Image (cartoon, helix red, strand yellow):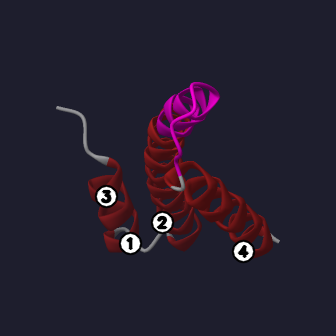
Amino acid sequence: MQLTTEEQERTAYAADNQPLAIAWGRIIDLENQACELRALIREAIENTARMRRAAARKDYGVESTDADADAESWHWRAEKALEDDE
């Protein structure tokens, strides 16, 4: 039976192997970041599709203020994510 990443980390701590435990902890952090990024990408795809639909309606003379608000929100979030990453 293969141990989970968290179990590997706990095993390393129990064996007093600090470098290995720290490495496993970093792997856990990276896996969590990857999950968060995938969720953000899914949300971006959904919002982009909604903005494209709103823009298409606008081309046909249907007013849509949601598209502008969504675009502004995504612009702000992207800037914030870049700032947090630095």
Q: Which residue is mark 1?
A: 13
What amino acid does circle 1 point to?
A: Tyr
Image-quadrant location for residue 82: bottom right
Q: Residues within 10 Å of mark 3 (few under 14, many from 20)?
A: some
Mark 3 or mark 4, earlier in chain:
3
Where residue 60 appears, as percent x and y from the top left, is 57, 25
Foreground tag (2 vs 3): 3
Where residue 62 appears, as percent x and y from the top left, is 51, 37
Residue 21, labelled with which disc?
2
Q: Which residue is mark 3?
A: 6
Image-quadrant location for residue 85: bottom right
Mark 1 or mark 4, earlier in chain:
1
Q: CA distance from mark 2 to mark 3?
A: 10 Å
Which residues fall within the magenta stretch?
50-64
Residue at (71, 72) in percent of width and height:
80
Q: Is residue 58 magenta?
A: yes
Q: Is residue 36 magenta?
A: no
Q: CA distance from mark 1 to mark 2?
A: 6 Å
Q: Is residue 83 above or below residue 60?
A: below
Q: CA distance from mark 1 to mark 3?
A: 11 Å
In the rendered image, the residue lying farthest to the left is: 1
Q: Residues within 10 Å of mark 1 (few under 14, many from 20)?
A: some
